[in-house]
Image (spheres, grey):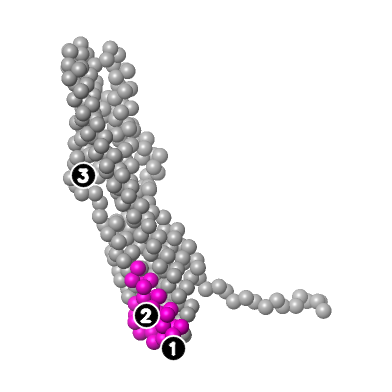
Amino acid sequence: MDMLGMLGNLPIAVQSLIVVAFFASLTVAGLYLVRRRVSPDALRGDHDVAGFTFGVVGAFYGVILAFVIVAVWQRFERANETAQHEALALSNLYDLSQGFDEPARTAMQSALRSYTSEVVNREWTAMATFGYRQSMSSEERIWQVLSTYTPGGARQQTFLDKSIDQIADLSDARQLRFVYYSEDLPSVIWIVIYVGCFITLGFGYFFGTRLFRSQAIMIATFASLIGLTILAISELSSPYQGAVVISDEPFRYALSRMTPSPPVQPDLPRPGAP
């Protein structure tokens, strides 16, 4: 139902210009057609009633838009926090793996690097193009290492217990990431938004000014503001698609911490040095 979603991954500035041009031109075109059939003098007698009704309709529609944009912003923030928690759990698991005995330490770190690399190199791109299919293989490797690891003492047991808590948080965050990716606003919300937009802008035709240009500018400005608000709702309702998306930087940072450091080469004496 999101018609503005057709703009795809265009830069947000380009999307804004297209939306302003579309809403303003379409509204002014409707005003022009109404003016050709109804003179401004015929409308002035009903300005009092039309003004009161327009105020009620505009206020009601404004409340709806405000409620929706706050809801989608909070949802976007929750999706962003979930991704950050997932990346943080990966970093914590990698740090905790330092307390494991071999070969569990190497197996755990390899599984964590594979998981994070898959998120950065495959899953994030797939989510942006609606091609993401949830796979549990990397997560299952981490669970397998933890479930088969036998601690060699109280110290290793503490690291194992903390790691199990972190993998549980990681699994929850991963599931929530899929939920935020796959769910959009209900269709009824988009119906209310677009039908309300049509009705609210249509009420602007019940007024008539002496100059067509002045009324056209006013109604085009009003339509542009509504269009930009709907654009903001459209972008925030899809946290992983569009021009405004959640960044994968937390995962890239976590992956950079997991990259094994190259061995330090000893300083060799330079030729001719004593």
* Residue 146, disc: 2
Mark 3 to mark 2 CA distance (whole Å): 44 Å
Q: Which of marks 2 and 1 is in front?
A: 1
**Residue 237 coordinates in the image, percent (x, y):** 30, 48
Residues under numbered marks 3 and 2 in contact, where contact means CB atoms less than 8 Å apart: no
Counting from the top left corner in percent of width and height, residue 217 is at 33, 22
Q: Does 20 appear above or below 209?
A: below
Classed neighbour count for the residue bearing mark 2: other residues with Cα under 10 Å, few (<14), some (14–19), many (≥20): many
Q: How far apart are marks 2 and 1 (CA)?
A: 13 Å
Query: What's under tag 3, amino acid-wise?
Result: Ile
Secondary structure character of the magenta stretch overall: helix
Name the quarter where the N terminus is drawn. top left
Say if the magenta span includes residue 165: yes
- Mark 2 or mark 1: whose residue is earlier in sequence: 2
Give the residue drawn at x 36%, y 40%. Answer: 15
**Residue 232 image offset from top left, x and y in percent:** 33, 42
Label ID, residue 189:
3
- Amino acid type, mark 2: Leu
Q: Circles 1 and 3: CB distance less than 8 Å?
A: no
Q: How far is the residue under mark 1 from the one under mark 3?
A: 57 Å
State the residue position of label 1: 152
Q: Can residue 150 be seen in this view?
A: yes
Which residue range is magenta in the image? 142-169
Mark toward the start of the polypeptide (3 vs 2): 2
